[in-house]
Amino acid sequence: MANIKLEGLRHSYADNPKNDEDWALKQIDLEWEDGGAYALLGPSGCGKTTLLNIISGLLQPSHGSIKFDDLEVNQISTDKRDIAQIFQFPVVYDTMSVYDNLAFPLRNLGLSEEKVNERVTEIAQLVELTSILTSRASGLTAGDKQKISLGRGLVRTKVNAILFDEPLTVIDPHLKWQLRSKLKKLHKLLNRTMIYVTHDQIEALTFADKVVVMNFGEVLQIGTPVELFEKPKHTFVGHFIGSPGMNILPCKLDGDNTKIGQYIIETASQVTQNHKGKNLEIGVRPEFIKFSDDGLPVSIVKVSNVGHAQIVETSFEGHKIKLIIDEDVVLPSNNVHLSFNKEKTYLYVDSWLV
């Protein structure tokens, strides 16, 4: 295993990139600690898979270096990097048995059949393939085939990292939950560095100790699930994580005060006059808003009951503001006002947290 460090990494698929739009990955400096469980989270096309393929060596970056511990591996081939990669669609040898699929990487390393059998038996038990070891892979379900891919990624004892590229996309929802829980347990058991690419925030937040949020080829924030939820460093992070996401509202400065319309909104951010003339927004999550006797006057537009709570959509001067309240709370019928939790309300300048 190894620390994986990316320094000054940039990549473009264009021959002569000129604009920001030409870069699939913009400047990225990032370190994955040995034994950590990470998720790369972001929408389709944001650069997650490109970054993963650069780490594994399937793709050479346009600029920058990849280091395993202190060794630069840019010019080291994929097979020499000791990386296991599990792809979105199961990659199995259909004509082989489940046992032979799992044994294949070990036999390539020249291990004795005794050691191969010992390791295959151990991994098959971990990923729940023991009962079908003698079955041919061709007749198996997509879920079982993805378990084989997972097993092949785990079967080698010497790997620097295990990379997962949207591995549960083709799996039905119930099995998806089971495999996600299994991956979490396997990480704790094996203590291997795992990097999990997904566009699904639930997958990312339940699997990873730390989540790397990306958009448009940039890393916007790295943090624990709690850090990303409670203090997003970028409005995209606030909007992308959470259901519903963070309320992002245009605001203005009046002296030292932050205002939405003509109403002062207190924030946890330090306001300065240097922020004037820029794109200013207030961000607050629906969980940190409540009805009050005074505050920001709004009208109620829609109420959705989600079982344990109500999601209330309100409007102020054409701007939607959502809040989450307990299911048994009675909604006010007139003179509706909202108050924001100051400690959880933030000012953003040009989309970045102040």
Image (cartoon, rainbow, N blue to C red):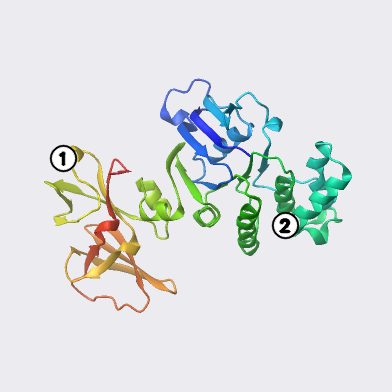
Quadrant location of the N terminus in the rendered image: top right
> Residue 272: which quarter of the image?
top left
20, above or below 316, in the image: above
The crowd level at tag 2 (other Cα within 10 Å; few <14, some 14-19, many 20+) is some
Residue appearing at x 74%, y 43% in the figure: 156
Q: What residue type is labelled 1?
A: Gln
Q: 290 left or right of 56?
A: left
Q: Name the residue carrying label 1.
A: 273
What's the distance in space between the residues labelled 1 and 2, CA to CA? 58 Å
Q: 63 left or right of 120?
A: left
Residue appearing at x 49%, y 48% in the figure: 211
Q: Nearer the viewer, residue 140 or 84?
A: 84
Q: How many callouts does the rendering have?
A: 2
Q: Which mark is residue 110?
A: none
Single out the mark in the foreground, 1 or 2.
Answer: 2
Residue appearing at x 19%, y 45% in the figure: 271
> Residue 299: which quarter of the image?
bottom left
Q: Is mark 2 on a helix, strand or loop?
A: helix
> Residue 352: which quarter of the image?
top left
Any part of residue 100 in sight:
no
Q: Which mark is residue 126?
A: 2
Residue 344 lies, in percent from the top left, at 30, 57
Q: 291 left or right of 236?
A: left
Residue 269 lies, in percent from the top left, at 24, 49
287, above or below 89, in the image: below
Any part of residue 198 in sight:
yes
Residue 107 lies, in percent from the top left, at 83, 40
Quadrant location of the C terminus in the rendered image: top left
